[in-house]
Image: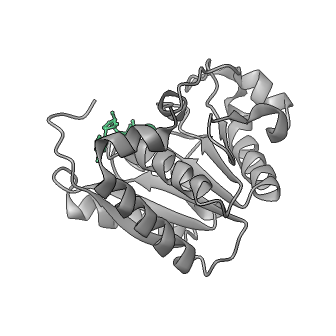
Amino acid sequence: MSLIEKQQRHSLEQIAEVKRILCATEHAMENRMPATLLVTSAAPAEGKSLFAAVLAATAAQSGKYRVAALDLNWHRPALHAFFDLDLSHSLQDIVGTALSDLVGPSGQDALDILTAPADYSDDCDLNALVAPLTSRLITQAKAAYDLVIVDSAAIFPTNRMMMDPVMLSGITDGVVMMVLTAATPRQQVRKAQKIMEGAGANILGVIANQRRMSARS
Ligand SMILES: Nc1ncnc2c1ncn2[C@@H]1O[C@H](COP(=O)(O)OP(=O)(O)OP(=O)(O)O)[C@@H](O)[C@H]1O
Ligand SMILES: [Mg+2]
């Protein structure tokens, strides 16, 4: 069963909302495709990966785009789980391989997924390569797909030297910020926004995730 079908079983309203967000995103990007879109948030566990997965599936289902969803949150990989995929590459595989040989089918037409490496750790030997590597993956994805959705880590805490969502915000065409409304202080969202704008980010908008979560994992 596709991600969309799973979602549809839960809430038709949510799907309508994601379609509206896709439409607003297309408008904000002035329909300039191909385009790369970063999904990030100020704090962890605000719903970035779920939103990135559903937006990618919704865009592919529209029939207008070839879509790639890239899991560039290697600290807390999640996209694979939404599409029932395994983490099948090592970081070394990703370093030495073109994006076209790394992406796999999502199970849904017109949507490919790049899963995170299975063996990434913050202190691994290849860390110095990660910034140029992620930039190369984004460039290759933009050349091969109409819409590239990048799932990333949260801006805070700032403890990632090599795969910083702030750096990603500066090299993607647009940024969508998830905000878990009941949890994240407004000042923290503003601070994250300012930091990304300082890095040259084109912030398209904020998505309010109104889900109430008892605790962040
Ligand atoms: N609106 C929602 N409705 C239902 N479940 C949700 C919603 N938002 C988030 N969740 C669930 O909350 C959990 C955390 O969401 P998700 O993994 O998307 O957050 P994240 O921001 O990507 O986290 P991380 O910072 O770890 O990458 C997941 O199990 C996700 O399915
Ligand atoms: Mg995530």
What residue sits 64% from the left and 21% below the top?
124
For the residue pair 180 and 75, the one nearer the viewer reads as 180
Residue 109 found in image quarter: top right
Up/down of 17 relative to 133, above or below: below
For the residue pair 49 and 217, the one nearer the viewer reads as 49
Q: Quadrant where the C terminus lies? A: top left
Number of numbered discs on residues: 0
Q: Answer whether residue 73 is visible to the viewer in this image.
A: yes
Is 75 on the left-hand or right-hand side of 106?
A: left
What residue sits 55% from the left and 30% below the top?
80
- State how the image is colored: one colour
Is 167 on the left-hand or right-hand side of 143?
A: left
What residue sits 49% from the left and 72% below the top?
23
Up/down of 43 relative to 21, above or below: above
Up/down of 88 relative to 57, above or below: above
Task: Report the image quarter containing ligand 2.
Answer: top left
Residue 158, position in %: x, y? Answer: 42, 45
Residue 129, position in %: x, y? Answer: 74, 36
Residue 99, position in %: x, y? Answer: 80, 40
For the residue pair 60 and 151, the one nearer the viewer reads as 60
Q: Answer whether residue 157 is visible to the viewer in this image.
A: no
Residue 96 found in image quarter: top right
Is 15 on the left-hand or right-hand side of 200?
A: left
Residue 155, position in %: x, y? Answer: 42, 50
Is 170 on the left-hand or right-hand side of 142?
A: left
